[in-house]
Amino acid sequence: PSPRILIVGGVAAGMSAASRARRLNPDAHVTVFDRGEYVSYGACGLPYVLGGDVPRFGEEGWDALVARTPGQMRARGVGVRLRHEVTGIDAGAGTLSVLDRDAGRTLTEPYDRLLLATGVSALRPDWAQTELGGVHVLRDIPDAQAIEASLKGARRAAVVGGGYIGIELTEALRSRGLSVVLLEQAPEIAGRALDTAYRRRVREELERGGVDVRCGVSVEGLTGKAGRVTGVQTSDGLVRADLVIVAVGIRPNVELARAAGVRLGKTGAVAVNTRQETNVAGIYAAGDNTEAVHRVTRRRVHVPLGLSANRMGRVAGVNMAGGDATFPGIVGTAIFKCFGLGAARTGLTQAEADALGLKALSVDVESTDHAGYYKGAQPIHVRLTGEVGTGRLLGAQLVGSPGSVKRVDVVAALLGQRADVEALFAADLAYAPPFSGVWDVLLVAADQLR
Ligand code: FAD
Ligand code: NAD
């Protein structure tokens, strides 16, 4: 029989699952429901479209981020229903309630296998729940279009939250000629990503880029005039702004799952096994709404990032179509750019290892991203962290020129194998003067740590 596979959410996890399931089982009926207007696009590119780093084409330029249009998905045999919001799951009956927003009616759709790929939503503190124009979050293409519209005539921006989105959008807004004040409530920006010294380097780069960075500041409210925001009231005084970005974190979209009896983990995201199966028979979960096992700590974590969303979706798609695939887990690898600097991390920071009660030791190495005598050499800072006693590799952080910090991947690959520091030191890494020193900075760090 041809299984009926229904998917809620059509971006990274949902579309990866749909494509895989159809490819593996061409008889499967695969339908994707999304409450939005866009599916199968790279949200990660949104700051770069706004900043002007992505050549624009299509309707106002957003098509550049679309991997496959609904028409292309349909041609591959995947049904795509836009502006269809799934409002309930009857797990006993094996049906979904789906609100067709345009027709204003609710449909009942039977399934054999169901994937929840509902992603996350941006947090909006009370002060950000406003009708004032010019106040935005950034999660999807319509959010980015709204920011683009607010950019017209805007001169001063306030970005609240110095995490990944806050940092990337700050650079984008500077590229568009706005003055930017970045407001972070923690003592330093980039809180989740890096140890303090490395976070400071990112802040200094923002300041070199002309950004007014204020840490340890709390937002108390917004001011407005004639329906449009005019400023942010903070513990540090009034910051005048005609555009306000709220980038203070996210929460997983788990309401549907919870109501259907799907178990959530301690992180608040959906708990799954390595096949992406939830505790409810026939229901799978994948992507930003879902937990993953951290291969260094073996704990369940919620790290909502693009590769894991795609990979979890792929695994779920194979299994829903009758195949057998497992998700290997993650090691907490992330990377971002900020003006002339890239920053990357994998595994655990020293602070994270300390918080887990691990006996961890870090070394810091400063070098150049390629041979010092070859033109254009830039500084690179590396922190390598290992476990005292066992010699196990625990993590790495790199801050340097944007291309140079991608070498974090070497450590990420080894962490996935639970390798020790010695194994990193023994790695036969590539060398030529335009790319690295003969002893790459990672090898120097491993030598010091072993
Ligand atoms: P989402 O992309 O959130 O998609 C979920 C979909 O589900 C949405 O379209 C939503 O409309 C739909 N949905 C939810 N509930 C329902 C319902 N009840 N009915 C119907 N539809 C529903 N990650 C990186 O690794 N690197 C980066 O550089 C990076 N940059 C980013 C930059 C920005 C600005 C943003 C916002 C994210 C970035 N990310 C990055 C994160 C990355 O985009 C996500 O990990 C990825 O999009 C997650 O995909 P997903 O399919 O799990 O969820
Ligand atoms: P985040 O958790 O990375 O950062 C939120 C920041 O806001 C933190 O620094 C936090 O201290 C601060 N904050 C919280 N409440 C505040 C308040 N009231 N006032 C001021 N500051 C406050 O979240 P995000 O930047 O919204 O990003 C969301 C997710 O998007 C990330 O977790 C990541 O998964 C993904 N993302 C990844 C990348 C990348 O990998 N390059 C880029 C963009 C987005």
Image (cartoon, grey):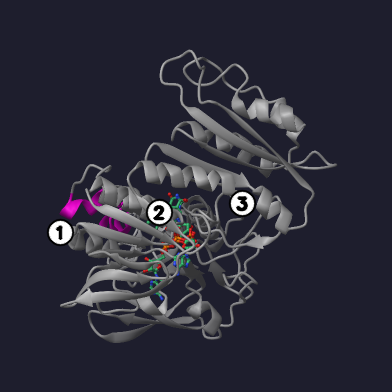
Q: Is residue 355 left or right of residue 302?
A: right
Residue at image position (77%, 31%) is 450
For the residues marked 2 and 1, what is the alpha-carbon distance in whole angstroms?
24 Å
User: Where, by quadrant of the figure, is residue 82 drawn?
Assistant: bottom left
Secondary structure, mark 1, is loop
Q: Which mark is residue 316?
A: none
Secondary structure, mark 2, is strand
The first of marks 2 and 1 along the sequence is 1
Residue at image position (73%, 58%) is 356
Q: Is mark 2 within 8 Å of ligand 2?
A: no
Find out whether the residues at labels 2 and 1 contact each other: C-beta distance under 8 Å. Answer: no
Query: Label 3 is placed on what type of residue?
Result: Ile
Residue 2 visible? The answer is: no
**Which residue does the numbered mark 3 point to in the structure image?**
330
The first of marks 1 and 3 along the sequence is 1
* Mark 1 Cα shell of 10 Å, populated few (<14), some (14-19), many (≥20): few
**Which residue does the numbered mark 1 point to in the structure image?**
152
User: Magenta stretch: dominant SS?
Assistant: helix
* Mark 2 Cα shell of 10 Å, populated few (<14), some (14-19), many (≥20): some
Residue at image position (40%, 80%) is 126
Q: Position of residue 420 (x, y in %)?
A: 76, 37
Q: Position of residue 145 (x, y in %)?
A: 23, 61
Span shown in magenta: 58-75
Q: Is residue 150 left or right of residue 333?
A: left
Secondary structure, mark 3, is loop
Find out whether the residues at labels 1 and 3 contact each other: C-beta distance under 8 Å. Answer: no
